[in-house]
Every structure is written in structure tokens, then in C-alpha cells.
Amino acid sequence: MYAIEFENITKEFPGIIANKDISFKVKKGTIHALIGENGAGKSTLMSILFGLYEPTKGLIKINEEYVNIQNPNMANNLGIGMVHQHFKLVKIYSNLENIILGAEFRNKNGLIHKNKSREKIEIIQKKFNLNFNLDALSGKSSIPVQQKVEIMKMLYRDNDILIFDEPTAVLTDDEISGLLETMKLFREQGKTIIFISHKLKEVKEVADTATVIRHGEVVLNCDVRETSIEQLAQAMVGGELQDIKNTNNNFDKDHIILEINNVNTKGAKTLKNINLKVHKGEILAIAGIEGNGQTQIEYLLSGLLKPVTGNIKFYTITNTFKVYKQSNDNDFDIDTKLKKIYKKKNYDNIEILKTYGEDKKGSFCLVQTKEFIDITNLNIFKRSKLNLSYVPTDRHAHGLVLDYNVKMNLVLRRLWDKTYQKFGMFKNKNILNKTQKILEDYDVRGARDGVSLARSMSGGNQQKFIVGREMSHDHDLIVIMQPTRGLDVGAIKNIHEKLLKEKANGNAILLISYELDEILALADTIAIVNKGEIVKQCSVNEITRQEIGLYMSDSFKKENEVK
């Protein structure tokens, strides 16, 4: 018996055909993988199944009966539930309240009967080993717990068709293993699962059948056991892909770009005595199980978190026009204030690049200053003016304004940049040209030359745009968090190539990733964090995968000395 049947589903948006004549069937009690590049139309198709969109044309059968799913309530009534790529939780509600929202048990007076709901949920938790605190606030819960809440929302509503949209993109290896085991348990209980993923190893491990979509059309329906990972990858991208590997681990050890000295923070998850140096042409990767201080390091460098002790220094080069007084080689002066500042500087780091003529005061010069500046207490706006690019973990909270168009999201962090504005008026041609180049170089789909709202793009295309935006602006250092989260194999290859090009051009890269394969492929140096401390720092060639896992584990005992 087929639980789901798609018959010639087409979905059109203004200027975009997201799905074109899609047809496939999913047997009841199986796990069916839906695979494709970012923007291929996977999430759109599942949004149609869940009632968020209506198809332009085509038909859907559920349990071999034609249905017209007009909204999520109708989908729930048909036994269809969905865990979205970006969770749909009310952060100020408890986990219990989020689970029962819209499906509460009520007594005869219409009051919510939470205890009855709790009893049902606790039975489900025990049955599927989905243990978490029901009374904790969802906004304060970890990502894995939030995902369990989303899963519980489906099970609480007795859904038999479960849609998982990129569920492993935000999880660590151990958490992924746990989720895949849970999905297998659902299958044993007769539930039907659609598993959207770019991680083909996971697809091979858990799925029975698969459909590959490319540019909105089905290019392959297959039995996963009879199809290799290479065949799935080729179907996704339309050709063969070669692995990317950093084969040159050399960098300028005498030229430090970023230095973190004895930094400590306070709070629920503290950093303890963090010391890091990132050099010119170096990729330094921070590895560790999620929740061991990576987010705090990210926030330190972006300006969202201030340390209680220690400092952060950044090597910067600034070019400014100044008057060079012939009578005093150490006196570059525009006004009295600057004159006082310059007397304190190390003049070995000051160079006159060009002289534009002389007057009675001296020469008008283009002066380059190279110096380490203390950015510990600089705010976010001032840091944006440095040659420091930043790709955040949470693209929705810190990377985009979803209800602004893509072009506006290009310039939001750089409203001061004269490339994009003059006297407060936008230079629309420059903005459009820059946007189009990013969309082309990073294969960002669904942006319609930058006029689409950021929220209209898929999560993967949002990620590609943010990475492209930050890499395309002048920088000496890029702090890049989870750069390939939720991306397909082709997009991952493209971004890895660009990161290695950054290294070759002499830029410094601080990479924080939960993908150990990514770290081993790209890094020159690895720093492993465990419980807020750097417990090991060395060349990536001096440590094995197994040793990294040991340093990351809860049972690890800290070395006496970090190299």
C-alpha cells in the first residue's frame, strides 16, 4: 500500500517554476529520502504536502485516496506532520505548551487540561526514548531538545506520515546517530517518513527508497540499497564531483592577524583562559561537540559578548590622507588631537604611500598605518568597519533580515560604505551589480536579481548568499561558522574551493564547524574545545581523527600543557 502518491505536481511562483511535473510514490511504513541541490524544490514540494502551499497543478493521494490539502490543519487531520528546517516554536512557551499548542485537551468548562496532555506525552517519550524536560522554556533549550519538541508535536497529534526537512543539519555526530535510530524506530512502528537531506551517507544508512530532484524535476527514483553514494551525488548535480583537500599547510607564522589572550567569560557556558593566534594565510579550525564554547567564541569576535578578563587584538591596515610636516619626520598632523595620538605610535608601522605636492605646511600624503588594535570593547558597528568578515551560525538571527529583499541584505552591515551610498542616498547600480555577482558566483537561486525577500529563498540559498556576501567584501580575516550547514554536495565543493582560495591569497580564516570531515579537509591548525577550554591545539597533520574524538569526549582529562 502506498501512503503518499504525487501525480504531476507543478508549483509556480512569479518568475520561478519550483516544481515541474513531479511524480513518485512512497510505500507505507518506509523511509523515503528526498535529495537535491539547494533550491531544487524539495522543501516546496513538502510544503505542498503539509498544506502550506497549494500546487499550481497536479494531484496527491494519501493512503490511495485523492486529497486536497489546503492548510496544515487539514494535513494534520490526514495524519501528516512536519519538522521544518527552521523550528516553529514559541520561545517564551514551555516545551509542553509548544507541543500541545492548537491541540489542547480541554475540560467541560473549556479550560486546558495540561495534566492529561502531559500523561500522553510522557507515554510517547518512553515509547520512543525522546526524553527532555517538558517544563523548560523552548527558547532556553538546546537545539537537539528543540528538535525533539518538534518531533513530539507530530507524535502527540498521532501523525503517521512524518516529514523531516534537513533534520541533521544542526546536530553533532552523536546526535545524528540518535536521530537516525529514532527514525528507524518510527519505521518499525509502521510510520512513513520523508527524509530531506544532503548527507548521502545518512541517506544510505537509513532510507529504503529515494527520489532525486534537480531544477524542480525528478531525475531519479531508486532503491537506496541498489544505488551507490556516487550515483546519488551525480544525479543531484548532473556530473561527477571530486573531493576538495587542503594540500598546502604552509602559512606566514610571523604575521599574526588575530590574537586572543587569556580570555575568560561569565555565564551559563563560560570560556576559560582562551588563547588563540590566527596567522596570515592560515585556516585555524575550532572543533568540539556543540555547546562547549564555540558559540561564545563566535560572539566574542562578532561583538555580541564581552570578556571579563583578557583581550582580543586584530591586525589592521588603514590608509588615510594626512599632512606630512617636513620639519618633523615623526609628526603626521591633521588636527591637534591626531597629532597627540600619533606621537604615541610605533613609526616603523607607518609608511607614506604617495605624496600629492607641497605647500607651506608640508606635503599632502596618503599614509598607510599597520598596527594591532585592541577590539575587545569595540561594538558591532565599529567592528564592521574593520577588514573582518563574519558568517554567523544562526543565519536568521544574525545573518539576514528576512523581510528585507536580498539587495538590502547585501548592504545592511555596511551602510557606512561609500561603495553603496553617497550622502545617505543608495547607489542602486553598484548594489545591483554586486548582488548579481554574488548570486552568480555562489549559485544562489530564487533571489530574482536580488528583489526577492530573503525569506523566500530556501535555507541553503540563504546560507550561500551570506557566505558570498562576507567573502566578497575586503577582509584580512573571516570568522566563518558552519559555512556549509544545510548545503548540497555541489555547493559545499564550491565554498570549500573559495575558502582555499582565500588562504592562497593570504587571508586568515577562523573556521568553526561541527563537521569533522570539513575540518580535516580544510584546516592547517586545529584547536579542540571541551567545556569552554582549549584542550588541544596543533597542526592538523599531527593528530588523528580518533584522537580528536577523544579530546572532544566528556571523559577526556585535560593535558598538562596545550601546544
Image (cartoon, rainbow, N blue to C red):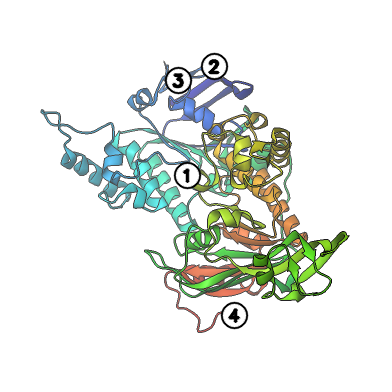
Q: Nearer the viewer, residue 479 or 361?
A: 361
Kind of residue at disc 1: Pro
From the viewer's perspective, is the residue at label 4 or at label 3 nearer?
A: 4
**First of labels 4, 2 by sequence position:** 2
**First of labels 2, 1 by sequence position:** 2
**First of labels 1, 4 by sequence position:** 1
Measure the alpha-carbon separation of dots 4 and 2. Answer: 61 Å
Tell me whether circle 1 and circle 4 mark residues in contact (CB < 8 Å).
no
Question: How packed is label 4: few (under 14 Cα within 10 Å), some, or many (20 or more)?
Answer: few
Give the percent coordinates (x, y) of residue 395: 53, 46
Kind of residue at disc 4: Lys
Q: Which residue corresponds to mark 2?
A: 56
Q: Which residue corresponds to mark 3?
A: 61
Kind of residue at disc 2: Thr
Measure the alpha-carbon separation of dots 2 and 1. Answer: 27 Å
Q: Nearer the viewer, residue 255 or 105?
A: 255
Res. 120 image quadrant? top left
**Looking at the figure, which quarter contains the N terminus?**
top left
| Helix, strand or loop at mark 3 | strand
Measure the alpha-carbon separation of dots 1 and 4. Answer: 37 Å
Question: How packed is label 1: few (under 14 Cα within 10 Å), some, or many (20 or more)?
Answer: many
Give the percent coordinates (x, y) of residue 261: 55, 74
Question: How packed is label 3: few (under 14 Cα within 10 Å), some, or many (20 or more)?
Answer: some
Q: Which residue corresponds to mark 1?
A: 167
Visible in this render: residue 1?
A: no
Measure the alpha-carbon separation of dots 3 and 2. Answer: 16 Å
Give the percent coordinates (x, y) of residue 150: 37, 41
Q: Which residue corresponds to mark 4?
A: 563
